[in-house]
Amino acid sequence: MKSPNTTAVRIEDLAKVFLSRNGTALQALHNINLEVRSGEVVAIIGPSGCGKSSLLRILAGLDKVYEGRVHWNLAGDHGGDKPRRDRLTSATVFQSDSTLPWLTVDRNVRIGLSRLRIDRREADTRVQEVLRLVGLAEFPKAYPHELSGGMRQRVAIARALATRPHLLLMDEPLAALDAQTRIVMQQELLNIWRQTHSTVFYVTHDIEEAVTVADRVVVLSTRPGRVRLVREIGTRTSSVTDLRRETEFGDLVAELWEVIAGEVGVSLAANDSGNSGNPAKAKAGVA
Amino acid sequence: MTGQVLRSTDTPVADIDVSDVADRLRRDRGRQQRKRKAWAILTPLAVLLAWELATRTGLLDERFFPSPTGILTDSSHYFTDPQLRAELFSNLAQSGVRLGIGFLLGSAVGLVVGLAMGLHPVTRYALSSLISGIYPLPKLTLFPLMIIFFGIGNTSMIALIALGVFFMVSINTTSGVIYSNPVYGDVASAFELPRLVRLRTITIPAAIPSVIGGLRLGFGQALIIVVSTEFVAGDGGVGYMIWNSWQVLNVPVMFLGLAIVGLTGWLVSACISLVGRLLAPWQND
């Protein structure tokens, strides 16, 4: 069990600059300072194109080119216990469909375990367990193209959960699901995290979802993304439906919406004054 | 909660007979499939019929365009007469050997080099200008060079076929590896897949559809090259048979040769597609 006060990831003065195809520089992230504590769920929200996904890719180790420092302090990172590793350092759920079409559901989940030193039986148990959790226990032998988009995304979630990661990274994991399944999955994720005391970095554009799942919500500004606001979420009701009835829930959503609306408004105004003759460009700021 | 529940049902109002509906849907699907097959067969038959009529009415010159039934009777001798049959089969065997060895050799080397270029950027940078420089050349222009290297005979022909197949397969394999959906690579990295697992379960399966496409194109190239080198070499084979029968104005045999080449191309292409559907069932084409 991790003590709740240790830092899992510390991000210091992080900046990310992309080079576009024609060689112009584009800054996605600016001066990000952020700590993710062990066992905490941090949700990142912000206008589209604010660098949420770039930040997640850096934390996932998929993007190693950035300015500033990121310290991972995750168990399993220390070389000593690597041979007996039964949990991944981090696992990612991607925004787009990331199931492998040539593998069955069951093997899609199992592939995530290939780095771990666990025996077959343990792997079987884990796969069955996570498939039951995401409601796909009846489809272990189905191929992704036989499933709906929402079911495929649940396969991807199951794959990440099966590795019992020290850090779970989720990039709009529920965006592809229909509204009802989304709320059911929010509940499921909350239940799982309560049980496993997971450290989660959760990117979403859905303010209600952020307030529902997170212990802390971080609002990023428009591009280049900076930390605009960090808000602790006090509500700790175990049921998603009960939570949605609370007045505090509505207040928080409204408060966060105002911050984001302000951001979008700022970007619209900036674009308007900058390119008054180009409405298409102003639109791109929100889209 | 305000508002009141106006109506709530948990049983459907009227039951429908699912098996009846399924029967109807199956009938519809069957009809659709029969329609597709009927058209696929009818069109070629109509062309043959038009040809037959045009020859019989004298619209087409019978010396150059004998009627399909005439071709059929003439070429049937090649299956009944022992001497002619031996001649035909010897030509078929020669072309078959050249085609088979050249295609297998070219695809094997193409696969390995294509994979290497896909996985190893430096190999790709190093070879790409060479490959894109030689690839656009009509392969027959390299035939004299092959004869210098390998001498007159089968070896130089096989080498040229293998070369043509190699380009198609290697280029398509490389693009299958580097242009497959980037999220597959992200999954491999994010879950720290061991190198071999990554190659076996991510990189290669992702490239399969493109490799299958390369093999089909490669076989098309192989057919072109085998026939055209046999035109030039005058050393037996179906290509030689076509060219020779044209020169002695034995036109029905020329058409027999054309039919053999066409059917081979169609059959092998269908087989490669079938293998592709078996290896990549998620791909719906």
Image (cartoon, coloured by chain):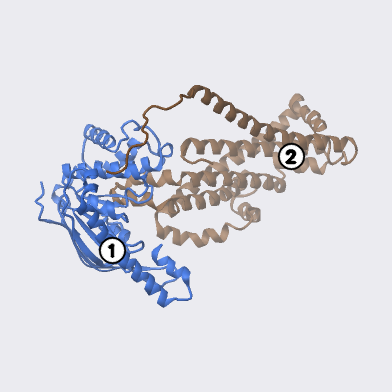
Chain colours: A blue, B brown
Q: Give the residue number, with chain letter if any, for mark 1.
A: A258
Q: Quadrant of residue A148?
A: top left
Spatial CA distance of label 1 from label 2 is 82 Å
Residue B170 at x, y = what percent?
50, 51
Please state if B159 lies on the left or on the right of A271 as rendered: right
Q: What residue type is labelled 2?
A: Met
Between residue A164 and residue A207, name the one nearer to us.
A207
Residue B236 visible to the viewer: no
What residue is shown with label 2? Answer: B241
Image coordinates of residue A52 in percent, x first then y, are 30, 60
Q: Nearer the viewer, mark 1 or mark 2?
A: 1
On screen, residue A32 above or below B65: below
Closer to the camera, B149 or A24?
A24
Residue A207 seen = yes
Chain hosting mark 1? A
**Whole-percent x and y of residue B141?**
65, 56
Count of numbered badges drawn on the protein: 2
Q: On screen, B62 above or below A211?
A: above
Question: What type is the residue that disc 1 sits on?
Answer: Glu
On whether disc 1 and disc 2 are found on a single subunit, the reply is: no
Residue A33, horizontal then vertical, whole percent: 20, 66
Instruction: Tell me the tag on residue A37.
Output: none
Q: Classify B126 as above or below A79.
A: below
Decide if residue B58 is on the left or right side of residue B162: right
Give the chain of mark 2. Answer: B
Q: Residue drawn 55% across and 38% down?
A: B273
Residue B10 falls left or right of residue B144: left
